[in-house]
Amino acid sequence: MKCSANENRRYLDNLISDFSDSLFQAAFKQYFSELGLHVRDWDGLFREMNADGGNLAFVRISERGDVIGFIQFKPLKFTSGFFEETCGFIREFWVADACRNQAHGSALLALAETHFLKNGIYTSILTTDTATDFYEKHGYISAPGCKAKNRDAVFVKHLVGQPGSAE
C-alpha cells in the first residue's frame, strides 16, 4: 500500500462498532503480524471484541480502499467509594508502515479524543511500549501511579475545551 501526504488527497474515516468488518480485520491482522503476535482463532478474537461491549474504532481508508490505520477505543469506568470517572481507553492503535509520519496517527487520535468529548468523557488513558514520544507530543503524560495489567507504561491526557474539540 502506498500513502501520500498530498493535501488534496481525501480519506474516509469510518466509525465502526462491529469488528466483523473485513477492512478492520485485515488491518488488525497486519498490526498483530508486525508485533510478531500469532492468534489461533481470529474469528473468536473478533467475536470477543464485539461481545466485550462499548468497543468502537475509527478506520481510516484511502481513496483506493486501502486501510491506512485504525484506533480502537472504549469508555472505561473507574469507581471508588467517593468518586466515579469514565475515561476514554485507547485499546489498540495502528498506522500502516507506508503511511506513518504523514499525520494519520495524529488525525486518528484526534478523532477518538473528539468522540470522547462529545460523549462527556474528559480523560483519555492508554498503555504503550513503543510510542511514548508520539503520545507526549499530543499532550499525554506518564501516570506512574497507575499500573496496567500488561505492565506497559500508562499515559493519560485530560481533554479540555468544549465538547467536540480535543486540544
Image (cartoon, grey):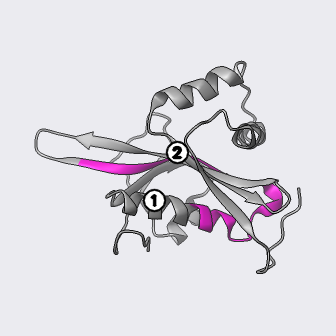
Give how far apart the Cα atoms at labels 2 and 1 are. 10 Å
Q: Vertical placement of 161 versus 104: above or below?
A: below
Q: Vertical placement of 50 versus 159: above or below?
A: above
Does the magenta run of residues contain 101?
Answer: yes
Q: Nearer the viewer, residue 43 or 15?
A: 15
| Residue at numbered disc 2 | 56
Amino acid type for the residue under numbered disc 1: His
Left or right, 63 with respect to 115, comes to: right
Q: Vertical placement of 68 versus 84: above or below?
A: below
Amino acid type for the residue under numbered disc 2: Leu
Residue 92 image position (x, y, % from top left): 58, 45
Q: Nearer the viewer, residue 8 or 83?
A: 8
* Dots 2, 1 in contact, CB < 8 A: yes
Residue numbers of the magenta segment: 85-108
Quadrant containing the C terminus in the rendered view: bottom left
Q: Which residue is situated farthest in the right direction here?
A: 2
Q: Which of 16 and 128 is in front in this view?
A: 16
Left or right, 81 with respect to 51, comes to: left
| Residue at numbered disc 1 | 115
Q: Residue at x 44, y 39 (%)?
A: 54
